[in-house]
């Protein structure tokens, strides 16, 4: 029984440890890829599989915690630290940045296996969430610039007439945009569209009718990768070309 | 920096340490309450405003980590900063896994402590704000009749009035009346508002399964 659909990466400069852990990992059913330096891990072409990353704190080319900070800027597998030089501030820093565990050498087999299982489980959840978000973003990107202006108004609770006035277009034109948005976003109902917009962090502007509630729910607690606001801040005007105004 | 109205709760069995912490925090503008043991802390009423907990690890009776677990099992989400003279890595990791905001070993820099306290109190303040909004929503929802709740559920699922009428075996006019009462009682300015409120009540911030759920249309 092999779980070769899950992969464990290991970066540690101790060759004997790499060999020993690789054997243990393979025996436990995981595919293991080991590296002596962080740069080799970065350069490795990674398959699209649930994974975790085991890191030492003291690596030849970079401090493990510094490496964790750099990785945190992007998407990376959950990290388990194993180290011979475990000090408390390092462990606090590692855990604050989201490490699954911080184990001191000699590392107990059971503790390591448990940590890896937890890490891979976490990775599956994160991968699933990212895939969904990417799908929603793909649909949003297919909207025209005008449709992207209509969407926030409509999910903020503006009546068609109000939204049309806001954009200086006719109500009929607005209704056409609205229908196209529903179709392109694959929303089964307006309620669905509201939920999809929330997932994409489409900005909610309080309409005259909606009052304080709409404003408070727009409190974005963190920049979600693949949010509309992020895209809007990075790339202005890259919508699909509009046929009509 | 510590915020106004933030209370720091200090639990440590060493009296002079408690006194020293107290004066440091007071001089930084925080309100302070001190306890000589976990048991004493657990018996005291919780503050109503934003607060955070400064905990020692090693205390006679219930230790800091056990108090952390106890608070978690009681559903009390007070941000915790551990301050200790004796610690090892596994203890630290356990504290962080339990959700500690910071873990400082003595001797520590006063600025590090004050910085951590500021963060913790702000975190508590935001969490309380979220919670009070939920409390408000639940209070409004509690005023809905059973039929109104049924209608609200179907409306936020995206059904049209006439579809709801068929499903509930009522007239469309009745459905419209219920719907308008729901909007009023929930203080929703639009269907979009109501949908968000409904999701909020269900605690629906689930990331997974979303695309599958709505594409089955």
Image: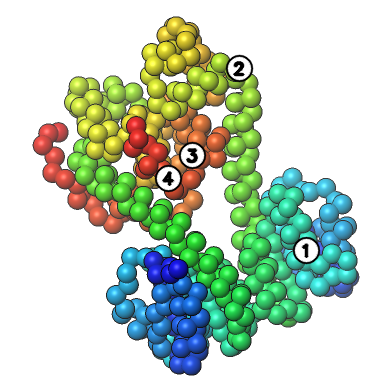
Q: Chain of mark 2?
A: B
Q: Earlier in the sequence, mark 4 or mark 2?
A: 2
* Label disc, if present, on residue A165 of the rendered structure: none
Marks 3 and 1, Cα distance to the nearest angstrom? 36 Å
Q: Are marks 3 and 1 on the same chain?
A: no
Q: Nearer the viewer, mark 3 or mark 1?
A: 1
Q: Nearer the viewer, mark 4 or mark 2?
A: 4
Q: Where B107 falls versus A133 (above or below)?
A: below
Instruction: Find numbered disc 4 in the image and state the secondary structure of the residue it sits on.
Output: loop
Q: Are marks 4 and 1 on the same chain?
A: yes
Instruction: Find numbered disc 1 in the image and state the secondary structure of the residue it sits on.
Output: helix
Look at mark 4 in the image and give the residue it sits on: B209
Marks 3 and 4, Cα distance to the nearest angstrom? 22 Å
Look at mark 2 in the image and give the residue it sits on: B145
Look at mark 3 in the image and give the residue it sits on: A217
Cβ atoms at labels 3 and 2 below 8 Å apart = no
Cβ atoms at labels 4 and 2 below 8 Å apart = no
Q: Residues within 10 Å of mark 2 (few under 14, many from 20)?
A: few
Q: Is residue A160 visible?
A: yes
Residue A65 in the image, given as x and y percentages of width and height: 50, 79
Q: Are marks 1 and 2 on the same chain?
A: yes
Q: Residues within 10 Å of mark 3 (few under 14, many from 20)?
A: some
Q: Nearer the viewer, mark 3 or mark 4?
A: 4
């Amino acid at each position: 029984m092999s779980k070769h659909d899950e992969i464990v990466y290991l970066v540690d400069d101790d060759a004997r440890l790499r060999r020993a852990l690789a054997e243990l990992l393979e025996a436990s059913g995981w595919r293991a890829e080991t590296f002596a330096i962080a740069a080799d891990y970065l350069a490795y072409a990674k398959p699209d599989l649930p994974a975790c990353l085991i890191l030492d704190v003291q690596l030849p080319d970079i401090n493990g915690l510094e490496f964790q900070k750099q990785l945190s800027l992007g998407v990376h597998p959950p990290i388990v630290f194993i180290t011979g030089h475990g000090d408390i501030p390092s462990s606090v820093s590692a855990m604050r940045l989201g490490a699954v565990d911080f184990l001191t050498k000699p590392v107990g087999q059971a503790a390591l296996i448990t940590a890896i299982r937890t890490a891979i489980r976490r990775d599956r959840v994160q991968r699933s969430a990212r895939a969904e978000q990417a799908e929603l973003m793909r649909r949003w990107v297919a909207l025209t610039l005008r449709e992207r202006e209509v969407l926030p108004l409509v999910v903020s609770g503006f009546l068609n007439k109000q939204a049309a006035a806001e954009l200086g277009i006719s109500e009929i034109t607005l209704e056409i945009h609205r229908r196209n948005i529903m179709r392109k976003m694959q929303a089964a109902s307006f309620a669905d569209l509201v939920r999809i917009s929330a997932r994409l962090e489409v900005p909610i502007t309080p309409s005259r009718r909606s009052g304080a509630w709409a404003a408070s729910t727009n409190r974005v607690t963190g920049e979600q990768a693949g949010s509309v606001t992020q895209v809007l801040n990075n790339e202005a005007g890259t919508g699909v070309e509009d046929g009509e105004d | 920096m510590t915020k106004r109205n933030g209370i720091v709760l200090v639990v440590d069995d060493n009296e002079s340490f408690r006194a020293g912490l107290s004066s440091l925090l007071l001089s930084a503008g925080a309100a302070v309450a001190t306890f000589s043991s976990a048991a004493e802390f657990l018996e005291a009423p919780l503050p109503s405003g934003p607060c955070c907990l400064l905990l020692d690890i090693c205390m006679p009776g219930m230790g800091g980590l056990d108090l952390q677990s106890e608070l978690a099992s009681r559903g009390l989400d007070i941000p915790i900063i551990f301050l200790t003279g004796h610690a090892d890595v596994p203890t630290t990791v356990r504290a962080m896994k339990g959700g500690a905001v910071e873990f400082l070993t003595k001797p520590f820099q006063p600025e590090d402590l004050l910085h951590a306290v500021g963060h913790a109190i702000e975190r508590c303040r935001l969490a309380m704000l979220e919670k009070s909004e939920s409390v408000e929503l639940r209070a409004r929802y509690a005023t809905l009749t059973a039929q109104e709740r049924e209608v609200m559920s179907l409306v936020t699922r995206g059904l049209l009035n006439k579809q709801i009428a068929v499903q509930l075996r009522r007239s469309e006019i009745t459905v419209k009346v219920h719907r308008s009462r729901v909007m009023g009682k929930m203080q929703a300015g639009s269907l979009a508002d109501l949908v968000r409120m409904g999701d909020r009540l269900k605690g629906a911030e689930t990331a997974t399964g979303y695309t599958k759920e709505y594409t089955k249309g």
